Image: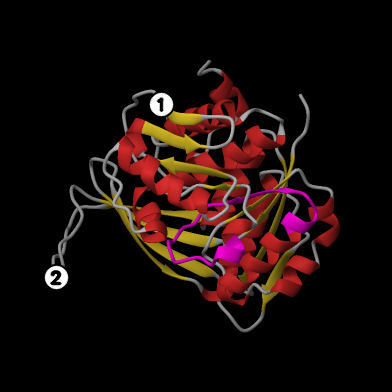
Amino acid sequence: MVMSKIVVVGSSNTDMVIKSEHLPAPGETILGGEFFMNPGGKGANQAVAAARLGGDVVFVAKVGDDIFGQEAVQGFREAGINTDYIATDPEQPSGVATIMVDNQGENCIAVASGANNALRPEDVDNAMEQIEGADVLLMQLETPIETVEYAAKLGHDKGKTVILNPAPAQVLSDELLARLDVITPNETEAEILTGTQVETLEDAQKAAQVLRERDVGTVIITLGAQGAFVLSDSFSGLVPVRKVNVVDTTAAGDTFNGALAVGMARGMDIEAAVAYANKAAAVSVTRMGAQASAPSLDEVEAED
C-alpha cells in the first residue's frame, strides 16, 4: 500500500469524560456517572486516526510542561506519529476538555485551550520541510486563527491538498476559504459559516453552494447518521453511512477527517474518500473515547 504523508496542524487536549444517563440541565447535578480520562484534542484525534489507518503523520502542535503534555506526546509516539514538531510551552498548561456523554451517545464539551492558544506561525515554519514533502495538510480551529491562516497559505502556495475541519465553528475570511481544497463542517458549523440552517439535504446543498461560491474547492457537510453531503467539481450528492449501535459520538468527526485525509493522500476520488471516512467514523462511534475509538486499517477494510 502506498504510504500517504499527512501534516496535521492542530490542538492536543486531555479529555475528562463522564458518562451518565442524560446530559445535565443548567444547575442540575447527576450522580452515578462513569469517569474516563483520555487523550484528545481535535488535531491530536485527527492525527491519531490518520496514523492508525496507515498514514505517515507529522503533528505540529504545542503542549504544556506538565504530565498531561508528556503523556500526550508519548501516546503520539506509540501511535507512530512524528512528534518532532510538537513544542513545549513553559508558561502555559496543556489543553484539557471536560466531556459529558449520555446513554444515546450525545455529548457536550467545554475546553480550556492552554498551550494550544500559543501555537504560532513560526511553529508551522519549523515544519516547512515536512509540509513540502506532504500530500495533505489537515487543520482545525482549536488553535489561533492566524496560525491556521498562515498554514493554509503555506500549504496552498506549495500545491498541497489543504483540508480544514472548521470546528469549533467561527466566521472565516474569504482569503482563508479560497486557499482550501476541502472544508468539512457539520450542520451547525455550516450554518455559522453560511447563514443557512441545515436540516435537510436541500439545505445542505444550499449551504455547500454558498461555500463553493466563496472559492472553496470541495465542500463536505457531515450529517451524522445520514452520512455526508458532498459538492465538488466531480461529484455532488449524499454519501451514506451504514447504521451502527451508537455508544459515543465523541471524535467521530475527527475520525472522519483523519480518514478523509488518508483517502485523499492515497489518490482516492472524492466520493470514495468520503465513503472511506464514513466507514471509519461508523466504527469509532461504537465505542467510548476520542483517540481510543479511532479504528485500525484492518477494522475499516473489514467493512468492505
Q: Position of residue 66 (x, y in %)?
A: 60, 72
Q: Which amino acid does label 2 sit on?
A: Gly
Q: From this view, report whether residue 237 is shown above or below residue 120.
A: above
Q: From this view, report whether residue 184 is shown above or below residue 267.
A: below
Label total for image? 2
Q: What stretch is highlighted in magenta?
A: 155-176
Q: Residue at x 49, y 61 (%)?
A: 14
Q: Residue at x 86, y 57 (%)?
A: 129
Q: Is mark 2 on a helix, strand or loop?
A: loop
Q: Which residue is drawn at 67% across and 60% down?
A: 152
Q: What residue type is labelled 1?
A: Pro
Question: What residue is pinned by disc 2?
Answer: 27
Q: Is residue 102 left or right of residue 304?
A: left
- Magenta run includes residue 52: no
Q: Position of residue 184 (x, y in %)?
A: 50, 47
Q: Is residue 278 left or right of residue 267?
A: left
Q: From this view, report whether residue 137 is shown above or below residue 235.
A: below
- Residue 283 falls in which quadrant of the image? top left
Look at the image and tell me whether residue 251 can be seen: no
- Residue 171 falls in which quadrant of the image? bottom left
- Residue 53 falls in which quadrant of the image? top right
Question: What residue is pinned by disc 1?
Answer: 240
Q: In this view, does 157 lie to the left or right of 79?
A: right
The residue closer to the viewer here, 66 or 105, is: 105
- Magenta run includes residue 170: yes
Q: What element carries label 1?
A: strand
Look at the image and tell me whether residue 246 can be seen: yes
Label 2, label 1: how many angstroms apart (C-alpha)? 39 Å
